[in-house]
Image (cartoon, rainbow, N blue to C red):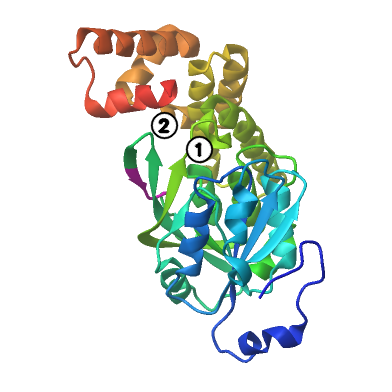
Amino acid sequence: MRFDRVGRPPLKSEHSEYMQSAKPLVSVIIPCFNAEECVAEAIASALGQSYRPVEVIVVDDGSTDASLAKIQTFGQDVILYSGPNEGGCAARNRGLALSHGELIQFLDADDLLYPEKLERQISAMGAEADEVTYCDWREETKGKQRVLSPQYFPGDSVLTNVVGTLQTSSVLHRSTLLKAVGGFRVGLRCAQERELHLRMACHSVKFRHVPEELYVVRRREGSVGWDRGKVAAVSCGIDFEWFNYLESNGQLTEPRRRAFAAVLARKARWLMADGKAPLARGWFAKAQAIHPTGWRDAYGRREALLFRIAGFRGTEALLQAALGLEERLGRRLFSRKAAARIDAARR
């Protein structure tokens, strides 16, 4: 089954086997821009799902390498759209417009789905029309691996999405909910998934956690998410936008207010480590204004005590200098947890 490059979608009769099935069709949407080294593996992981029925839609977003040729080797196993470069958000929205599935699985071209991902998340999905599921994932960066499991707050999906960022491929969406909120926000160069999921949560979409590792995120050097300072600068604006939305609609509970303050303070630390001191101080001041003590959650107890003496800028400078000294001396000056927190602000 295949679309013409810019032609008509198949007629409904061409999907009669899905319409008659009791199992919902899942559309796996893969945006691709210059991912010749990995896009074929991503497509293969989508086609290799234990769940059926599945349609795989690949949107080539103006690639200038051999990506398009790699995609074309799959022939009629994928639905292919090739157009000019418009960015990841526009490419995903294009795939959504072309899709026929009741359920939508986004997959970045450098990531991989485990064979049982769709089956596991569909089986965990309740009957409620305003509910979606998300899973844990493994992240690979420069040969290092770690499994990420965002904290789950049953009954408060806003809090779930404020405290943690659910990666693009983590969530199994309902097509109706995505279309109701307008899909991805076109023009964002990073933090796209955070904006979408936070917007959905603020509009009463429920997120249910499936506590299983079901896909792999492969961080490529030079990719959009590689520059942590840039991501922090954009996501701070997103967080503050939805904080104001909730406040203006009387939906800002005490736990939510505290969480927003902690998240903004943590990202201010990333900005300071990235050399963006004025921007970092501005966002840290907003964090303090949002909640009088919530910002402390971005620090350990000892770091918070140091803050009372040296303030934000002085604390960050002292902590980074001390960690650098630890590295040069080759001996531990901090506990593993404290060193990890400080190192997170430097990366």
Secondary structure under the numbered disc 1 in the rendered image: helix
Q: Is residue 147 magenta?
A: yes
At x 74% / y 43%, what residue is drawn?
A: 85
- In-image side of 125 versus 332 (left or right): right
Q: Splitting the image into 4 quarters, where does residue 346 fall?
A: top left
Q: In the image, residue 14 lies at what x, y percent?
A: 71, 85
Q: Is residue 67 magenta?
A: no
* Picture disc at residue 297: 2
* Residue 177 seen in the current view: yes
User: Which stretch appears magenta?
Assistant: 146-150
Disc 2 packing (10 Å; few <14; some 14–19; many ≥20)? some
Q: In the image, residue 189 lies at what x, y percent?
A: 67, 37
The secondary structure making up most of the magenta span is strand
| Front position in the image: 184 or 177 | 184
**Residue lying furthest right:** 7
- In-image side of 310 versus 165 (left or right): left
Q: In the image, residue 112 lies at what x, y percent?
A: 45, 55
Give the mark count: 2
Q: Splitting the image into 4 quarters, where does residue 114 fall?
A: bottom left
Would you name the residue on which mark 1 appears?
258
Q: Spatial distance from mark 1 to mark 2, Cα to Cα?
A: 9 Å
Q: In the image, residue 81 lies at what x, y percent?
A: 72, 59
Secondary structure under the numbered disc 2 in the rendered image: helix
